[in-house]
């Protein structure tokens, strides 16, 4: 149980294009999902917390207009990297937590990540 | 500031030998602590977690971790490693009621025959 699917697993695109990454909870409802960025050989940095039906909460230093997050259903959150540039190249990982706002003790389950390469 | 520190960037262990990966935390209160494993190019898998109670926590794949308040540590152990344990290991923490996970910088584990 608690499977999180992330798609695509890898994407290569030209500078200036927008890229959408999907994060789905396959066997549970996820009111809250999280988006992380991981630089090579480094740790995960939380970019934003995505809440179903409301605006995402972004961490300090993360550009809201650059990284658009939509959480339109209890099983799907999307991250769109707008007008992507080479410095946006990274490994993006999502996670999802079962339950509503009060279920903060539930662990996060992670997707397999998306390798984004901007040429 | 809240932080999780993994002092060892890279550890090499012989197959069959015991393993201990170090993790230290700095929080104003006792945090919830986690260990995750990441295989190359993949996401993170939860190995075990500590919320409260018994300070020795058992996880999946034969791993365990011990919470030591006096040392602000949550070290991960395995009595006998297998070649399939080669991966990146991350310690993470968060406070009760706060969902933001803070990750350590990770320890890369290499297994030699």
Image (cartoon, rainbow, N blue to C red):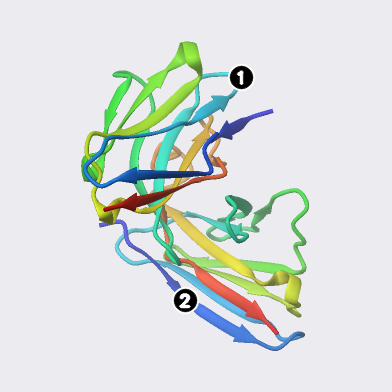
Q: Residue furthest top?
A: B70
Give the mark toward the camera: 1 or 2: 2
Is A71 on the left or on the right of A3, as rendered?
Answer: right
Q: Tell me, yes or no, if residue B71 can be seen here.
A: yes
In the drawing, what numbered circle is on residue B93?
none
To which quarter of the image does residue A3 belong?
bottom left
Q: Crowding near pointer 1: few (<14 within 10 Å), some, many (20+)?
A: few
To which quarter of the image does residue A92 belong?
bottom right
Q: Nearer the viewer, residue B67 or B30?
A: B67
Is A61 on the left or on the right of A94, as rendered?
Answer: right
Q: The disc numbered 2 marks a residue on which chain?
A: A
In the drawing, what numbered circle is on residue A9?
2
Classify the position of the N terminus of chain A by image quarter: bottom left
Q: Residue visible at 77% across and 85% down?
A: A16
Q: Position of residue B46 (x, y in %)?
A: 36, 47
Q: How many marks?
A: 2
Q: Position of residue A93 (x, y in %)?
A: 52, 62
Q: The disc numbered 1 marks a residue on which chain?
A: B
Q: Nearer the viewer, residue A45 or B63?
A: B63
Q: Above or below — where is A72 with respect to B64?
A: below
* Local SS, label 1: loop
The residue that mark 1 highlights is B28
Q: Residue furthest bottom?
A: A14
Is A73 on the left or on the right of A37, as rendered?
Answer: left
* Local SS, label 2: loop
Q: Are marks 1 and 2 on the same chain?
A: no
Classify the position of the C terminus of chain A by image quarter: bottom right
Q: Residue visible at 64% across and 74% down?
A: A80
Q: Nearer the viewer, residue A6 or B74?
A: B74
Q: Above or below — where is A116 with respect to B88?
A: below
The CA span between labels 1 and 2 is: 38 Å
């Amino acid at each position: 149980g608690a499977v999180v699917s992330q798609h695509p697993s890898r994407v290569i695109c030209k500078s200036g294009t927008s890229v959408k990454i999907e994060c789905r909870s396959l066997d549970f409802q996820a009111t809250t999902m999280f988006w992380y960025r991981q630089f090579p050989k480094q740790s995960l940095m939380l970019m934003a917390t995505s809440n179903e039906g409301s605006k995402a909460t972004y961490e300090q230093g993360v550009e809201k207009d650059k990284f658009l997050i939509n959480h339109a259903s209890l099983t799907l959150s999307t991250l769109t990297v707008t007008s992507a540039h080479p410095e946006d190249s990274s490994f993006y990982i999502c996670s999802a937590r079962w339950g509503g706002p009060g279920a903060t003790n539930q662990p996060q389950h992670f997707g397999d990540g998306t390798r984004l390469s901007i040429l | 500031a809240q932080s999780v520190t993994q002092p060892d960037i890279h550890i090499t262990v012989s197959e069959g030998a015991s393993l201990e990966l170090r993790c230290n935390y700095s929080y104003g209160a006792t945090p919830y602590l986690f260990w995750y494993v990441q295989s190359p190019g993949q996401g993170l898998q939860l190995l075990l977690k500590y919320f409260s109670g018994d300070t020795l926590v058992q996880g999946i794949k034969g791993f365990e971790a011990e919470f030591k308040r006096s040392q602000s540590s949550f070290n991960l152990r395995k009595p006998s490693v297998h070649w399939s344990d080669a991966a990146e290991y991350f310690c993470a923490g968060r406070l009760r009621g706060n969902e933001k996970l803070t990750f350590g910088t990770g320890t890369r584990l290499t297994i030699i025959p």
